[in-house]
Every structure is written in structure tokens, then in C-alpha cells.
Image (spheres, helix red, strand yellow):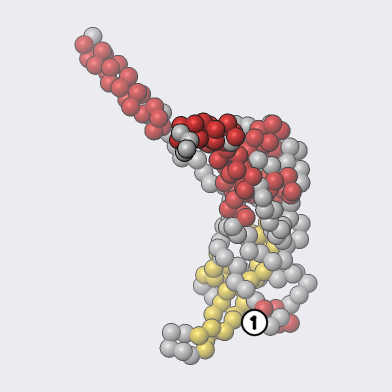
Amino acid sequence: MVGSPLKALSKSSVLSPCYATSQSCIRQIHHQVSASRIPPPTPFVPDSKTFLTLIGRNLVQQVAKIPTWESLFSLTSAQLREVGVEPARTRRYLLWWRDRFRKGVHGIGGDLRHVEKGTAKLRVVEVPHLSQTGLERRRKVVVDLPPEIGIETVSTAKLYPVKGFKVAGAHTIVGPYIQLHKNTAGSEATFAVREGMWEEKRGVKIDGGERRRKQVRYKRRIEENRKKRE
């Protein structure tokens, strides 16, 4: 005799704790998956302090609570709360940037290859490229090289343009956060880690934000009508 579906359902709910608390289990699995892969550091982002400095929102003040690269990419949201990373929106922002970094999404300077103590040297070079007509021409791009290496000693095939920077005029580097070198006519510059370079700015709440907008405007109309009657 086939058992009652209700009994089977009741039995499954007893055997599986996640049945009654599916949403809680989904969040738990999400946290475990999110913390499952630790990406390697990069020349521009070698440690947790640099990462927290770049993403801004004063998260660099939390470096004592997230001191290592492993802890930065392995702590779950609940664990971040336990160590004192508050408020909740700060944790969400950190987890959002952490997931982006895992996927290879960086802010400006994230693709730099030669960085010493948080600073890279940018230079303008000419590299060959094919035009739309198929003819080989040369174009000017911004690259980063170790300060001690001359451009003439490096093969153009090993030069990679740095994203976020361009050449204006004859040979002037243009881009955010750069410091042009003197006596180089703008063809050399320094780019260094700064607080909030990758920060995603929070939007400005209007009339209390989406959650409270109707209530705030309703109370405002009541107050305006009251003043008109007086």
C-alpha cells in the first residue's frame, strides 16, 4: 500500500532540517560558495590593506579585523559581523567588491604589472598595429615598466597598454590620479595607490529614499495644507 503523501512529506521534513528553513539554508550555501575561492594577489593589490584602501568607504579602518589575504576572501558575512565589521551595508559592499575581484573585475590600475610599494611608473611608447585598411601603422599607448628598464630594450610584443589612460597631443599621459614627471613633456608619470580609487559612491537619498518616500511626502503635504489653513 502506497503511503500517504502527507506522511511522506512530514517524514522528509523531519529528516531534512533544510526543508523547513529553506531560505536559511540557501543563504548558508551562498556564503559557503562565495568564500570557496581565494584569488591570487596582484602586483597592484598585494594584500588586504591595499584592497580595503582601494575600495574606500573607510574600510581600511577594518584592516585589523581582516589582516590577511586569506581572511579577506574566506570570511562569510556572519563571520565579518562577528569580528565587528559594521554596519550591514558595509559588509554587503565588501562582499560585492570581493566577488568582483574574484571574477577579474578591477578598478583603474588593476592591470598594472610592475608595481613597487604601491607605485607604478607610466610611460608613452609607440607600438605597431594594423589599420582598417590592413596597413601596419604605429600608435602611441601608455604602458608600465620597471623604472630601471629602458623602453628601447623591451620588445614591443611584450608591451601591454594600461587601461584607463590615454595619450593626448603628441605624448602627454592623461588619466586620473597620475603625477606627471618634470622635464618629460608629459610622457612619463607616476600612479600610486590612494584611498577610495575604486570606491562606488553611494546614491543620495531623496525624501527618505525609496522605502520612506511616500510617507515623507505624505507628511509634507499634510504640513503644507495645515500652514495654508492658518
- Residue 127 rendering spot, x and y as whole percentages: 59, 81
Q: Which residue lies furthest to the right in this view?
A: 148
Query: Which amino acid type is marked by label 1?
Result: Ala
Side (left or right) of 147 relative to 133: right
Depth order, front residue of 25/119: 25
Asked if 188 appears above or below 193 in the picture, the reply is below
Q: Residue furthest top?
A: 230
How many marks the image carries: the answer is: 1
Q: What residue lies at 68% left-to-right and 48% top-to-bottom?
A: 73
Q: What residue lies at 57% left-to-right and 84% top-to-bottom?
A: 128
Q: Which residue lies furthest to the front in this view?
A: 1
Answer whether residue 65 is visible to the viewer in this image: yes
| Crowdedness near tag 1: few (<14), some (14–19) or many (≥20) residues, C-alpha within 10 Å | few
- Residue 6 rendering spot, x and y as whole percentages: 46, 32
Asked if 163 appears above or below 16 in the picture, the reply is below
Asked if 79 appears above or below 141 in the picture, the reply is above
Please identify the quarter of the rendering in which residue 11 is found.
top right
Side (left or right) of 230 relative to 219: left
- Residue 179 rendering spot, x and y as whole percentages: 64, 59
- Residue 60 rendering spot, x and y as whole percentages: 68, 41
Asked if 205 appears above or below 168 in the picture, the reply is above
Residue labelled with disc 1: 157
Quadrant the C terminus occupies: top left
Answer whether residue 58 is visible to the viewer in this image: no
Q: Which residue lies furthest to the left in this view?
A: 229
Q: What residue lies at 54% left-to-right and 68% top-to-bottom?
A: 166
Please identify the quarter of the rendering in which residue 80 is found.
top right
Depth order, front residue of 2/76: 2
Q: Is mark 1 on a helix, strand or loop?
A: helix
Side (left or right) of 40 relative to 126: right
Side (left or right) of 215 relative to 203: left
